[in-house]
Image: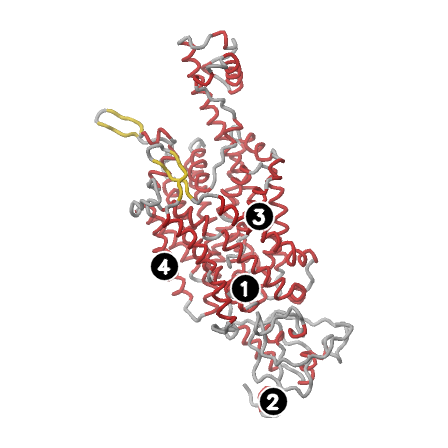
Amino acid sequence: MRKNSKVTQREHTSEHVTESVADLLAHEAPLDYKNSSLNVGGVPGKKIVLEPPENDGRPAWNSKLQYILAQVGFSVGLGNVWRFPYLCQKNGGGAYLVPYFILLILIGVPLFFLELAVGQKIRRGSIGVWNYVCPLLGGIGVSSLMVCGFVGLYYNVIIGWSIFYFFQSFQYPLPWAECPIRRNGSLAIVEPECEKSSATTYFWYRQTLNTTSTIADSGGLNVKMTLSLLVAWIIVCLAVIRGIASSGKVMYFSSLFPYVVLFCFLVRGLLLKGAVDGIAHMFTPKLEKMLEPQVWREAATQVFFALGLGFGGVIAFSSYNKIDNNCHFDAVLVSFINFFTSILATLVVFAVLGFKANLMNEKCVMENGEKILGYLNSNVLSHDLIPPHVNFSQLSTVDYAEIYAVIKTVKEGSFAELSLDPCVLEDELNKSVQGTGLAFIAFTEAMTHFPASPFWSVMFFFMLINLGLGSMIGTMTGITTPVLDTYKVQKELFTVCCCIIAFFCGLLFVQRSGNYFVTMFDDYSAGLPLTIVVILENVSVAWIYGTKRFMQDLEDMLGFRPHAFYFYMWKYVSPCCLIVLITATVIEMAISPPGYNAWVEELAQERFQSYPPWALAMCFSLIVVAMLPLPVVFIARYFNLMSDGSNKLSVSYRKNMMKDISNLEEVDEARSILGKNPGETPSPKPPSQAYLGPPGTNPLENPNSLSPNSCYGTTLPKTPQPPPSPTE
């Protein structure tokens, strides 16, 4: 620093140097105090222009499009393809879309906007953001990181499964198209386990997972799945290791390619026989379902996870933005792209399921037609019961329904002994298939009936890999960004170490019983902890920091004031909705027996089994470990056992602090901004605590502002403040 600089001169004089908390810790250029409307001698009504900081060395997105695609890639994932269609099918088809859309507006968009805004404003990862907003609740960021770790462990296993199926798709016929033949000398028989189930089900449970019948029987490592998991972690590591400069470019492909595949599948699906039946089933609303609380709870949960709230990836991505980026536009755009993607994927799924339902229904008609023909030949049934126009060699579903109704009426007393199935298409469409069952069983079975089936299989599983990769990049960024912001570690080395550790931890999921652990982590590691994390984020901003102050910050940052709708959502509606969601989740966990669907080899079908005591302890340990940082950090900081993290300012903060100090115009004017008396003794050093309030706002004047003993505080001395003027 030059010897004749203003700061140096002031150090050698008795003149006090006073800095504004808001000016030092916000990402704005130094304020022109003389022209500020907050200054008594300034020009009234003249707006303070807030400018983004100079380049501080923090990575930044190369373009707005790259950033949007990264957020879309993170939020649009496997859940849009197999979770949303399943919930739509289960909860009344078109009727489910109504509560989902309402809750997207009430919970999804406001909370997504909140995370984007705080990340962009503070330019830190999740740990740094919540340390600055409220140090006592700094455990929010650590809990987010823990959940990201748990989710990343099993999510990449699903990518590994997709990689295995992707490479298996390069052969004709597809390996899951037919049941394998077992040879016993000169006798060739169909594999009994496959014959009892189906070719695609057998390939999934026996040849892919080679699963055991209980979670207690590990069965050892599955070599094929272990190699697939290794490939998956190598891909993720290469995509993340160079930061957003590398992962942002990957997003151009991984975010856009799934839409190409979905549109191709939609066009192909609409040409399939029965596709219209499936789509009509989707959009036929069962309005009575809308009155069930379970439908609203599942819709809220899906909104919650579809946007990636609470994971930290949203905050991490937005922290690389410019300070004046229009994050409100981003929040609305990404939210509705996510909703559109879910609708598109559901159309594709229901078109394929309609095709599959017609195939299964025709198979049912053919099998039961043969039964009826056998009863006619053995004189169990009279030929008079069969209408003359019926041709058993080409028995249609309509003709079978007519025969079935006649036989049921005539043979009412002994009808059950005939073991005839009704073969109703609606029953096939109502069979809910979720998660891995939809992707690796239902879809694969439908694709075996497609012309050029290997091509469609390759496209489908390549799409799943890209969807999973986009979400994994966001999840890993939610882990690496907070740590890199908080500690001085080499980015490349830390990323590689994370991936290596995650791979070895992920070996739990590639045992023969690994599928059951994936279900366990999916059910317990994220749901309740993430909901608590998000409600604490909402409360810390809306009630502790103050919604009015946050709205003012947004106006300073964006150049316009967001609609009052967000004020009421953040303040009242979203917290209430989240409290109801937490309560409903806890009640469901209490009344629903913890367990999993195990594949029983002898029966060739799934059966529900309760978790053994050690697995039950593991389930609840996942919840406790994920939420443990919240009370630990709160207690440690409340009793001053832990630093509040405010001394770990990023480079941008330190640079802007020096920039603000060197550009202070007049000490008296600075004092007037802070509301200090001329003779007051200043603090010997700049405030070290972050403050998100609007420029010129004194936190001690605001009743919502927290003292140093509560959440965020300052090193300003506590002195009596003059009463506010009528205009304040």
* Amino acid residing under circle 2: Arg
Q: Nearer the viewer, mark 4 or mark 2?
A: 4
Per the image, label 3 sits on a secondary structure element best described as helix
Q: Is residue 452 visible?
A: no
Vertical relation: 87 (above or below) 60: above
Q: Is residue 438 above or below residue 680?
A: above
**Label 1 element class:** loop
Q: Which residue is mark 4?
A: 501
Residue 467, image x, y percentages: 48, 48
- Asked if the residue at tag 1 contacts the one at tag 3, i.e. Cβ–Cβ closer than 8 Å, the answer is no
Q: Quadrant of the C terminus?
A: bottom right
Mark 1 highlights which residue? 319
Among the two numbered marks 4 and 2 on one chain, the one whose residue lies closer to the N terminus: 2
Q: Which mark is residue 300?
A: 3
Badge 1 amino acid: Ser
Mark 1 or 4, nearer chain start: 1
- Mark 2 and mark 1 lie on one chain; the one further toward the N terminus is 2
Give neighbour class at mark 3: few <14, some 14-19, many 20+ (Cα, 10 Å).
many
